[in-house]
Image (spheres, rainbow, N blue to C red):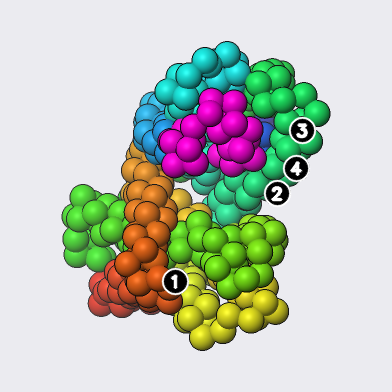
Amino acid sequence: MTTHVRAGATPANEIDSSYAWLRLVLALALGTIGSVGMWSFVVALPAVQADFGVARGEASLPFTLTMVGFGVGGILMGRLSDRFGIVIPMLGGAVALALGYFASSQANSLWLFAIAQGVIGFGSSATFGPLMADISHWFARRRGLAVALASCGNYLAGTVWPPITEHFIASSGWRATHIGIGLFCAVSMLPLIWMFRRPAPKHEAHVAAASALAARGSLGISSNTLMALLCVAGIGCCVAMSMPQVHIVAYCGDLGYGPARGAEMLALMMFFGIFSRVAAGFVADRIGGVTTLLISSILQGVALILYMLFDSLASLYVISALFGLFQGGLVPMYAVIVREYFPPHEAGTRLGFLLMATLIGMALGGWMSGVIFDLTGSYQAAFLNGLLWNLLNAAIASWLVFRPGRRRLAAA
């Protein structure tokens, strides 16, 4: 007996299939390329500052607009992916990256350059949250692992792109380098996006929606209340996360170890964060996203305590590696939780809002830590502040994990 599949439809057996894994590999590649927008300015900052003849604080403005563009883009691109599939937002992201890099290379003022960086951040957003949401539709048994792997493109970009960007800035200048990056994004991303034209599976959408409704009902709270709690949790965990990530270089300088040692510790965080994300995905497939979020939050708190207790050079290297290993799984868990508690057709939009909350947390935490250092002359109070915000995240995760209805549903 022959089974006919309607043109444009996705066969029922494609979930967890070899094509799903191929799509995951392509998503990882796209994430690694598109996330260049999150890292290139960090390398170009000294050259941009010298070119425009501005102070370091003014020269940091473009990075702020990059983050704003990334956050706003995550919501809009997520909404587009929910309505029209992943191809349209991905095409928009590739075009925005190419145009943003070209415009930045031609900017004759810092403000024009900053606006172009906002466009770059907007384009990069399509290669993070929307890709995680898309991959979540293609996996059931290994959804946590798949989402975690898809999120690793951002960290891989942070490992691969900085040395490449630095090399070309040193040899050709930052303007030519930005033109080259924009051209590379357009040429490399468009063929990969074409491979994503197959629509996401729909045959089990009603089953997934019913399962999410039951899971959320077991918590005894509305969808908006759950979203608000998750957004607060996202802010809390990322305020805590930002303290070492944003200030580790300055901290090492204050201790007399030099900024180069701090940069090496930051690289260690990123590297071990990749392993953390993969491990968290494995764990989430067995115990669920919320419980994995709680475990990761507790471990991140432990690492922050270690930073407060030890400050020798060797211990800071070890603690930085542990911090990366502990915190890397936090952000991908929000994508897993969205699929567990909300209907599939809302995944992109919901995740976009949650990722915006995490970006707010990173920005707030980086700023607060600097203010606290200025007031106290030490980073010890800043680490303590991060720990308190981390406790807020852990408290919300604990409240969700130990809700009586959720435990009854899990047992059933």
Looking at the rendered structure, the kind of residue marked 4 is Pro
What residue did someone put label 3 on?
A: 170
Give the Cα distance between marks 2 and 1: 27 Å
The residue that appears at 37% across and 75% down in the rendered structure is: 381
Give the Cα distance between marks 1 and 4: 29 Å
Tell me the crowding category of disc 3: few under 14, some 14 to 19, or many 20 or more residues within 10 angstroms, Cα based: few
* Figure quadrant of residue 238: bottom left
Horizontal arrangement in the rendering, residue 177 relative to residue 349 (left or right): right
In front here: 345 or 248? 248
What residue did someone put label 4 on?
A: 163
Give the number of the mark in front: 1 or 4. 1
Question: Height in image: 364 above or below 398?
Answer: above
The residue that appears at 58% across and 73% down in the rendered structure is: 255
Residue 94 shows up from this direction: no
Q: Is residue 59 magenta?
A: yes
- Which of disc 1 and disc 2 is earlier in sequence? 2
- Which of disc 4 and disc 1 is earlier in sequence? 4
What residue did someone put label 2 on?
A: 159
Question: Height in image: 385 above or below 183?
Answer: below
**Principal SS element in the magenta part?**
helix
The residue that appears at 30% across and 70% down in the rendered structure is: 392
What residue did someone put label 1 on?
A: 379
The residue that appears at 57% across and 13% down in the rendered structure is: 106
Residue 50 shows up from this direction: yes
